Image (cartoon, grey):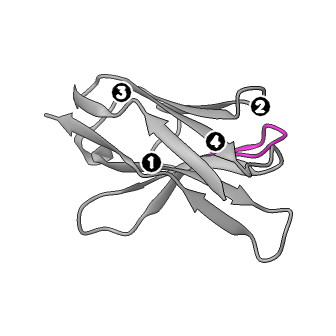
Amino acid sequence: QVHLVESGGGLVQAGGSLRLSCTASGSFDRSDALGWYRQAPGSQRELVATMTANGGTYYDDSVKARFTISRDNAKNTITLQMNSLKPEDTAVYYCNARRTSIWPPVDYWGQGTQVTVST
């Protein structure tokens, strides 16, 4: 089992910044992809950004040019730097590890951290 622990959520005014971090442990494999999803009240969980083990990245269009994902393979950590935050970024943010070395892929989730952006 992969264990994911997030930190860094909170309350910020629109236009501000927050930095989320997630550390993986347990049966985490460094070939796993790591990323962030978010879920707003009444909405489905959606992908925000992800990074593969070799550094390939994907960003949802809504966060491109505002959010930056980075990964430290030595520390098994994934970080999401969020700038120019908007009220619509308010959600619970979940760290995700996806094991793509097996089929079908397996997803592991953190407990979530609340991000609230006020107007």
- Residue beneath disc 4: 24
Query: What percent of the width, then of the height, locates residue 80?
Result: 52, 33
Q: Callout 3, which amino acid?
A: Ser
**On screen, residue 97 above or below 104:** above
Q: Secondary structure at mark 4?
A: strand
Q: Secondary structure at mark 3?
A: loop
Q: Are marks 3 and 1 in contact (CB under 8 Å)?
A: no
Question: Which labelled disc corresponds to residue 62?
Answer: 1
Question: Which labelled disc corresponds to residue 73?
Answer: 2
- Point out the tag, 1 or 4, that comes first from the N-terminus: 4
Q: Secondary structure at mark 1?
A: loop
Nearer mark to the viewer, of 1 and 4: 4
Q: Is residue 37 magenta?
A: no
The quarter in which the C terminus is drawn is top left
Task: Write the residue at 23% across / 62% down.
Answer: 41
The quarter in which the N terminus is drawn is bottom right
- Residue beneath disc 3: 84
Task: Write the residue at 36% across / 23% down.
Answer: 17
CA gap between label 1 and label 4 equals 26 Å
Q: Are marks 3 and 4 in contact (CB under 8 Å)?
A: no
Q: Secondary structure at mark 2?
A: loop
Q: Callout 4, which amino acid?
A: Ala
